[in-house]
Image (tube, rainbow, N blue to C red):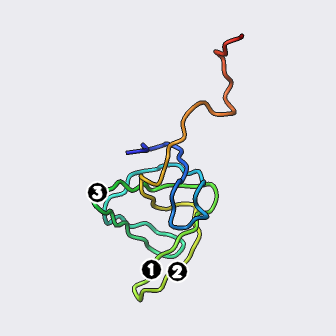
């Protein structure tokens, strides 16, 4: 698994190319059949072959879509969503805003 709860991660692969490069927070792992209310109505998670799926939150809007019962695709934008763990890379290291107290002088 690439990420753990609380990690910040970058989206490296997405169905909608506009989401690639977005920074998200990994909130929790999803279980097969979990339901989440979204801007387009309830969305159900379908976990395939046991691959981990994260419920994520993003400061900017993520572009997404749902299929209706009649097979229509509904596009919507939301700050939260589901994404496969394999499509995320965790961001680690010292934050730019942190002071570095143990610098080595040359």
**Pointer 2 local density, CA inside 10 Å: few below 14, some 14–19, many at least 20:** few
First of labels 2, 1 by sequence position = 1
The residue tagged 1 is 67
Element type where label 3 sits in the image: loop
The residue tagged 3 is 50
Q: Which quarter of the picture shows residue 91?
A: top right
First of labels 3, 1 by sequence position = 3
**Residue sitting at the far left:** 49
Query: Residue 11 in the image: x percent, y percent?
Result: 54, 54
From the viewer's side, name the closer residue of 18 and 102: 18
Query: Residue 47 in the image: x percent, y percent?
Result: 33, 62
**Pointer 1 local density, CA inside 10 Å: few below 14, some 14–19, many at least 20:** few
The alpha-carbon separation of the residues under discs 3 and 2 comes to 26 Å
6 horizontally vs 58: left or right:
left
Can you say whether 64 is above or below 6 in the image? below
Q: Residue at x 45, y 61 (%)?
A: 82
**Label 2–label 1 contact, CB within 8 A:** yes
**Residue sitting at the far right:** 106
The residue tagged 2 is 74
Q: Residue at x 35, y 54 (%)?
A: 52
Location of the N terminus by quadrant is top left
Q: Residue at x 59, y 50 (%)?
A: 23
């Amino acid at each position: 698994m690439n990420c753990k709860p609380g990690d910040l991660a970058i989206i490296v692969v997405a169905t909608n190319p506009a989401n690639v490069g977005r920074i998200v927070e990994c909130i929790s792992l999803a279980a097969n059949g979990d339901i989440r209310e979204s801007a387009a109505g309830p969305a159900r998670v379908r976990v395939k072959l046991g691959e981990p799926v994260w419920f994520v939150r993003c400061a900017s809007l993520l572009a997404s879509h749902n299929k209706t019962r009649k097979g229509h695709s509904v596009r919507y934008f939301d700050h939260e969503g589901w994404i496969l763990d394999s499509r995320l890379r965790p961001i680690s290291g010292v934050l730019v805003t942190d002071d570095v107290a143990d610098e080595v002088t040359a």
